[in-house]
Every structure is written in structure tokens, then in C-alpha cells.
Image (cartoon, rainbow, N blue to C red):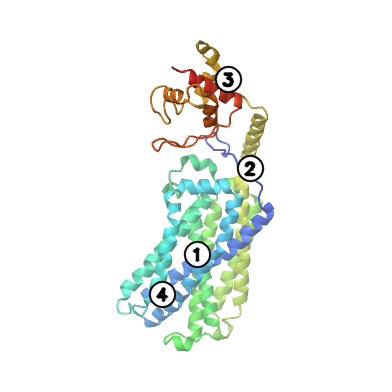
Amino acid sequence: MLLQISTPIPKDIPLPLPLPEWLLVTLLIVSFLFHIIFINLMVGGSIVTLWAQIKGLKEKKYDDFAHEIAKTITVNKSLAVVLGVAPLLSINTLYTVYFYSANALTGFAWIMIIPLVTIAFLLTYLHKYTWKTLENNRHLHISIIALAVAIFLIIPLIFLTNVNLMMFPEKWGTIKGFMSALTLPNVFPRYFEFLGACIAVTGIFIVWYNKRKNYPVEEIYIGFTRLDLKRLGFSIAVLGLALQILFGIVVLFTLPSKGIGFDVIGMMAIAGLLLAVALWYSYQSLVGTADKIDLHFNKIVAFIFIFMVFYGGSRQLYRHNSLDKHQQLMAAHTEEFQRLSLEARLNPVEDELELDESLGEFAMGGALFTQNCASCHKLDEKLVGPPVLEMAKIYKGNIPDLKKWIKTPGKKRPDYPQMPGFDLPDEDIEEISKYILSIK
């Protein structure tokens, strides 16, 4: 249960949101929608390129196909990175404590995202620009894109695991790193659904890419016609959409109940129906006659896009439902902390000085010295500053200069650090000075 004793209830950051919450949520959903499209194209494109290049070892036309898709990966990855800034900032702003707690708990894996992204991007450029150079060493060339694909598959898993973990603060006490967070429910079903989406979106992209009238298919390909390439794109899309629907059903049945409501189920059901329609039209395009292969393309794109809006909305709704009770507890904790903090500031408690009556008229000075000076000065040996006996000898009978030094100290000796100034009442500095000069 969410309210179990082991659930941490941290204080929230007591700062107002820079924008209304509804606007930040809208920005999160919309910006993530465009970001994820290019993530799908980046990951799906690299997977399709690897598959086609391996197949191209025996059939040259697939190697040409792989080369054409590889050219798009670097462009799509750049757009994915740029478009990822807005959703990352939005989720950080809306769920700061939750997001950074998840980051801290996954630790090393989260830190590795930047170097992994850098390496993967460099590999895609290396793969793209060594196509002719490594023409006689295709296995080495394939291994470059294979390594990039492996990294591209790891990075989304880290992100997904973190976003999943932030919704379950009741599990934070049991998480011992990234591998531990992977065992939380719904991680792998969502991940495989994501991979299905990558393949589906890439398939539709391939259809669009090759249906452009200004794209010189006849000059580039020997074994493929424009129709062949469209059918290949639709076949990839059908596979991806089928996988997405299959794992989407698994996701629905493995979602922890804490965030489930009729609103979430309703939005996910509509999203699933939209995806099923897109799958049906894609299949009809694949098996239909050549003159009708483009008939449903715009409808497929529209249904997939609307699906993403509904699915993104359902994920945000589930996140809101999951964290709602915990956020209420955290808000109450924060409010109580702020109340106590204000009360403490309005009613400061002054430390009572323990006076050593044996010091007589210097008792107050001795107590003030212990409170403010004893951490750096000992009686007869160097601690941080010089011994008290040395100070008493230097300023013997000269209270005004000693007071002036305590208020605005300088730096006389290279082997001693700079003494900080003390913003104490003049009468307190007077008492401290009398005490120091009284020491024999």
C-alpha cells in the first residue's frame, strides 16, 4: 500500500511552478509526442538498417536499401535530441522530487546516458560515412551499426525504467540500483511495446520516404521498384503495429492497480482501437492492388498520430493517479515544515551561556569566547589560529586594538589562515577582549 510505513515522504521544493500546471502538462504531452516520433525513427531505423544490411550480404538490393535508411538515422537522432529538451524540462518541473529520486536510485546507469548517447551517435556517423571505405569488409561495417543498435536499445530502457520508478515511491526503499529497478512491474511490457512502436513508425516512414515523386528510386535501386519499397515499408509497419497491440494488451493487464481508473482504461481502450484501425489499413495497403497502395496512407498516419495523443494522455493520467495520494502527503509535510520554520524564525531561541563563576568579572567574556572563538584558539598551543596566551601578550593592555582586530581581522602570517570577521554586539566583543587580556 502507498501509505505503508516504509514509504518516504520528503519535503517538496516550496517554489511556485513557472507556468500553470495544466499548461505544463499539455507542454509535456505535446512535446513528448514529437520527441518520441523521432526516437522511434532513430531506434527503428537503426534496427531496420541492421536487418537489411545483414540480408544484403546475399541480396545486393537490401544493402542499397540499408544504405538509404542509414542516411536518415543521423538526421532523426539530431531532431530527437533537440525535441527532447522540452519534455525533459517539463517532467523535471512537474515532478522534481520524484524524477530526481528515481535518477539517484538508478545511479550509474542514469549517469551513463550521456556517454552512451555520444558513443551511439558517433557510431552512426562512422557507419554512414564508411559505407564505401568498408565495402570490402562488410562484416566490420555491420558490426558498427550492430553496436549502435545495442546502445540505442539500452538508452530507452534506462529512461523508461526511471520514469516507471518515479511513480512508485513506496518501492524506493527496496531499490538497490538499475538492475533492481528493472524488476518493477510493467517495465519490460512497456519496453517491448516501445520497440513495436519504433518498428511501426519506421515502416510508415519508409513508405512515405519512397513514395515521394522527387525521390529517384530508379537511379538508386536495381532490384527494387517504388512499389516494392512501399510494400516493404507496409510489411514492416504491420509487424510493428501487431507487436505494439500485443504488448499494449500485456501493459494494460500488468499495470499496478494504484493508478488504474475508468479514465485511464477508457483512454487506453480508445488508443488501442485507433492502433487496430491503423493496423487494418496497413494490412489492406500491403495486400491490395498496386493502384490502391497509397489509398489509406494518410488515414494510417492520422490514426497513429491520434493514437499517440491518447496514449500519451493515458500515461500522464496514470502517473497523476499513481502519485496523487503521495503528493498530498508530501504537501502536508511541506506545509508543516514551513509552519514550524516560520514559527522558529519569529520566535528565535537564544543559546544560554554557561558562565564560569570562578572567572569573576571575566565570566561573561569567557563564556562568549567558548561560544565563538574556542573552535580555533587554544590556551597555549596552535589550533587553527594562534594560542590565546600569544594574543594576550601581543595586545597586552590594548583593548581597543584587540576589539578592532576581532571585528575586521586581516592576515599577518602566511602559516595561519585568514580569520573571519565577527558580527557581534560591541559589548560582547568588549567582554571577549577583556577575557583574553586577563589570561596570564
Q: Which residue is mark 4?
A: 128
Indicate which disc, 3 or 1, sits on the residue closer to the N terminus.
Answer: 1
Q: Count numbered badges in the picture.
A: 4
Using residue 357 as the reference point, say whether residue 123 is left or right of it.
Answer: left
- Crowding at dot 2, Cα within 10 Å, few <14 / some 14-19 / many 20+, comes out as few
Real-space CA distance between mark 3 and mark 2, rounded to the nearest whole angstrom: 32 Å
Amino acid type assigned to the residue bearing label 4 in the image: Lys
Q: Dot 4, how many residues are within 10 Å of its Cα: few (below 14), some (14-19), or many (20+)?
A: many
Disc 4 to disc 2: CB gap under 8 Å:
no
> Which one is nearer the viewer's eye here, 317 or 120?
120
Q: Nearer the viewer, mark 2 or mark 1?
A: 2
| Alpha-carbon span between mark 3 and mark 4 | 74 Å
Report the quarter where the C terminus lies: top left
Percent across and percent down for residue 318 are 61, 51
| Image quadrant containing the N terminus | top right
Instruction: Check disc 3 and report the residue beneath it.
Output: 352
In the figure, residue 220 lies in which quadrant? bottom left
Amino acid type at circle 2 is Pro
Residue 27, located in which quarter of the rendered image?
A: bottom right
Give the residue drawn at x 49%, y 52%. 161
**Distance of mark 4 from mark 2, alpha carbons?**
49 Å
